Image (spheres, helix red, strand yellow):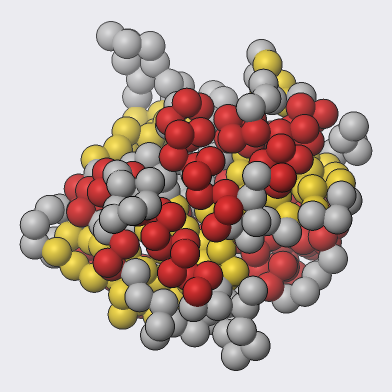
Amino acid sequence: MSTPERNGIVTGGTWCVDSNKLVEFWPQEDGLAEILSEESRGGGSGCNLAIDVKRLDPAFWVETIGLIGDDEDGRLLQAEADRYGIERRQLVTTAQAPTAHSDAFCSKLTGRRTHIYRTGAGALLTPDHFDFTTTRGRILHLGLPGVHPRMDAPWGADANGWITVLRKARQAGLVTNLELASVTAARLAELVRPLLPYLDLFIVNDSEMGAIGGEATVSAGRTDVEACIRAAKATLSASACGVVVAHFPTGAVAVTRSGEVVTQPSVRVPKTEVAGANGAGDAFAAGFLYAFHQGWALKEALALAHAAAAASLRSINTTDAVPTWRECLDLARQWGWNDPIA
């Protein structure tokens, strides 16, 4: 558990530059689609959640740990961190590889996003880059297993480097949380199940929870809520978590160590307001972690998580549309909530 003097959030892991492109639709192979707009911004779990939390509450303490290239993209990411007042002493540069880069395509037709990724400096990230003795944050948000080869590989006596980092964080008094990447279910299960005993929180989407909990949670594009709850309970029982959360387009479920199951419908976002889903999962996690850190009730934390995710849908980049936490909740009340989930 955390020590009393710790406060705020530490993000660790993926920092990349997203080349965000709005396209008419996502084409099949050998097809053609027009790029309607594009821009380059910060991306990755470490970057997105750090900025989202600072946008929710500019006075909140956020620091980060990661590895970027000594190049123009790396300087763009440093500038993004500085713009929001994120402590970045451990966002270090390397001359051995370029900054990680993602072409993030958002379909105007569906709002769905597709990432084509270059690992770059992320391939060189190891547990040695993480020093929690000089951090002051209380919660570690770590990602992304599956896209950092050295972290994914065995490290010393550990099955992978993620275990090493999570153990170090807990020994230093941090509460640990993990974010996942869109890799195959089999790969997620292989990498993440060994990490569960080192996690205090686990906030993922429905398909990711299904991969870890061994359930088919999504069928024909629809979420099976009961399967999500079963997967969450199985994940919880194999972990050290106090709470695990699965989110999906129509809502979210949270299962606690005491056996409580809490559900919360999502926000009824007008279709005219949706620009793209890029970063919505990060915004959900940011809202939940901020509320959890501040001691909110679980139902209220899920509501803010959904409100932040809903607000983020208004932009094709990952963070610009997230306002303060009060404005997120005001927007949710204005748009209303979807029907209660089963």
Image location of residue 2, percent across then percent down? 62, 78
Image location of residue 44, percent across then percent down? 40, 52
Q: 293 or 100: which is nearer to us?
A: 293
Image location of residue 201, percent across then percent down? 64, 57
- Check the image and report above or below for 245 versus 172: above
Image quadrant occupied by the N terminus:
bottom right
Q: 31 or 34: which is nearer to us?
A: 31
62 with respect to 116 (left or right): right
Outermost residue to the top: 30
251 with respect to 261 (left or right): left
91 with respect to 202 (left or right): left
Name the residue at 14% across, 64% down: 94
- Check the image and report above or below for 212 versus 245: above
Where residue 47 sits, quadrant-wise, is bottom left
Outermost residue to the left: 95
Where residue 88 sits, quadrant-wise, is bottom left
Residue 1 visible in the current orientation: yes
Q: 23 or 71: which is nearer to us?
A: 71
Where residue 15 sits, quadrant-wise, is bottom left
Name the residue at 31% across, 80% down: 89
- Check the image and report above or below for 228 versus 142: above
Name the residue at 64% across, 50% down: 239
139 with respect to 97 (left or right): right
Name the residue at 43% across, 55% down: 163
Count of number-bearing discs: 0
Image quadrant occupied by the C terminus:
top right
Residue 282 visible in the current orientation: no
Image location of residue 236, percent across then percent down? 70, 46
